Image (spheres, helix red, strand yellow):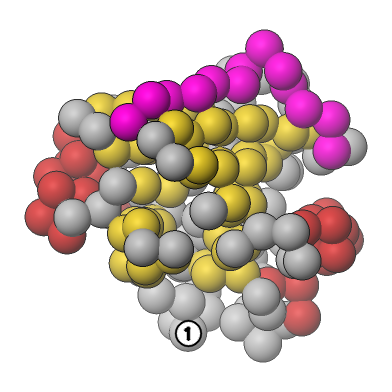
Amino acid sequence: MKLLIVSDSHGLRAELQQLKEKYAQTVDAMIHCGDSELLSSDEEVSEFLIVRGNCDYDRQFPLDIKQKIEGNTIFITHGHHYNVKMTLMNLLYKAKEIGAGFVFFGHSHMLGAEMIKGILFLNPGSLFMPRGRKEKTYAIVEKKNDSITTKFYTNAHEELVELRQTFIL
């Protein structure tokens, strides 16, 4: 399973279109964790699994998505309803409740990936206004056999190699 994860693009269009063109044929899903500030009818988000963030006003976007991809249960949310700027505990409880092995979220604009109790939690950072780092980022998550690799890329599609992690299941 290979996934593209992006969040907090705040009105950017060309960048999302570029990601679609680059990855649509090479990933199993493209995920947007909210605050696109676009409409559900906009072409730039047409192929994304996308949730509604606190800056999104289109009610067509759901607050959360639970999705099975290649036999893996994925949970997607923006994070503002789970208080992610303070703790991941609320997301952990939700992930356990629904049996998710992957949780993708945004809201804080701070990239990060960690394994908690066998569940991968990943925030891809922001394509618009990153916090904690200067690079505008997105992520690629790849699960092969018993390992998960997370990679973060700049908006110029250069991998931040020092942030690459592999988790053994």
Farthest front residue in view: 145
56 in magenta: no
Looking at the picture, tell me which residue is in the foreground, 89 or 150.
150
Name the quadrant containing residue 19: bottom right
Q: Quadrant of the C terminus?
A: top left
Which residue corresponds to the image point at 44% horizontal and 63% vertical from the top-left?
A: 70
Above-or-below relation of 85 to 163? below
Residue placed at 53% from the left, 69% from the top?
Answer: 49
Q: Nearer the viewer, residue 29 or 13?
A: 29
What residue is drawn where x is 32% and y is 59%?
73
- Residue 82 visible in the displayed image: no
> In the rendered structure, which segment of residues is drawn in magenta?
157-169
Of the pair 16 and 134, the residue shown nearer to us: 16
- At x 75% / y 66%, what residue is drawn? 24
Residue 27 image position (x, y, % from top left): 66, 59
Report x, y in % for residue 109. Answer: 55, 36
Q: Which residue is mark 1?
A: 60
- In this rendering, the count of numbered labels is 1
- How many other residues sit within 10 Å of disc 1, few (<14), some (14-19) or many (≥20)? few
Is residue 165 shown in magenta? yes
* SS for callout 1: loop
Residue 72 image position (x, y, % from top left): 36, 57
Q: Amino acid at mark 1?
A: Gln
Q: Is residue 76 left or right of residue 4?
A: left
